[in-house]
Amino acid sequence: MKFVDWYLKIAVVSAMIGGSMEFFMIKTGFYDKVTELESEKRAWENTPEAQAARDALNPWRGRDNKDASESSLTKKVCKQTKKAAHTLSLGGFEVIDEIKTQLEKTCPGIVSCADILALAARDSVSFKFNKPMWEVETGRRDGIVSRESDALNELPSPASDFKTLKQSFADKGLSVKDLVVLSGAHTIGVGKCIVFSNRLYNFTGKGDTDTSLNTTYAATLRSKCRSLSDQTTTVEMDPTSSLNFDNHYFTALKLRQGLFQSDAALLTNDVARGVVDQMLTSGKFYTQFGKSMKKMGAIGVLTGDEGKIRKKCNIV
């Protein structure tokens, strides 16, 4: 009877989900409903009736059948996105992997890597304020492919001019204001010399320096990045403030201390320059940053029965 009751309930819930689209969009509180259903499902799965049903439906259950997603080939494919030129200085992947490992122990197959990343991004800049800076909508599912070409094509290059940046963000439904505000994330972290050293040594192909760089700042960068071919040295993206989430990036930008060409490009447009000036007020930056991050977090998401929930974030 419990077997029939459970699957009748699943059928009814599935119909409700299909009709309301509740599980086919990201929303706040998504996991409240998911975990409620999952708890009831697990309680039933531990019953003798459930075991009998599994054995009847899958007589090969328990045999050694290594999951193809664990193969060295798929691991290699998934690493391609991390190797893309635009992501060379990214770090912290091991933190996401550890969070996923712990979640899989408690609630396997429920929380996506995409949601973990969105939540971790919010919490990494919110902890200093002892409160979440914005509300993260959840319900994302993970992609089933990972290609270096996607990262190269979808992410703007650090060498982009303003026109390219504006179009790239517009293609994703983001405004010039979003572009400037989200660039403020460069207040945290480092960049590899190889990504910007052409600005120091060969900007126009004549062995020259980018004149949009503050001369003192350029000299400091040259003392750290010794050549065009330095592929290992890293430099903080926000001078003197790369470990703190604040609005100092915009102060540095006004002093012509933007590390990348894409940073300096924000000062070449009147509208963008006006937003930079607005972000010099920390309260305005924190508020707008949360709004822009929420918008960006809804771009191209997979929901409902799209994609999958990865068992490991570094394996497709």
Image: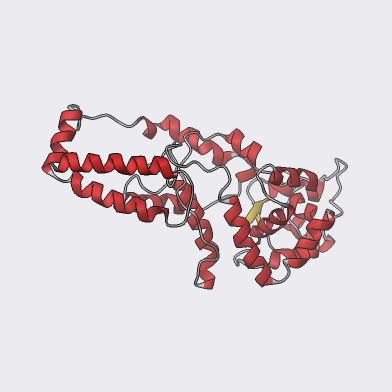
* Quadrant housing the C terminus: top left
Please say if 54 is above or below 247: above
In the depicted view, which residue is nearer to us: 19 or 244? 19
Side of 35 where 210 appears, left or right: right
Query: Residue 134: x percent and y percent?
Result: 54, 63
Is residue 157 at least partly visible in the picture?
no
Please say if 307 is above or below 170: above
Name which residue lies at 69% across and 67% down.
248
Q: In this figure, which colouring scheme has been used for the structure?
A: secondary structure
Q: Which of the 4 image quarters holds residue 291?
A: bottom right
Query: Residue 37: x percent and y percent?
Result: 30, 50
Total marks placed: 0
Name which residue lies at 37% across and 34% down.
70
Q: Which of the 4 image quarters holds residue 164?
A: top right
Q: Looking at this rendering, what residue extends furthest in the top direction?
A: 60
Side of 307 where 250 appears, left or right: right
Query: Residue 299: x percent and y percent?
Result: 58, 46
Name which residue lies at 39% across and 53% down.
31
* Quadrant housing the N terminus: top left
Is residue 175 at least partly visible in the picture?
yes
In the depicted view, which residue is nearer to us: 30 or 84? 30
Query: Residue 229: x percent and y percent?
Result: 71, 43
Side of 13 where 1 appears, left or right: left
Name which residue lies at 45% across and 48% down.
139
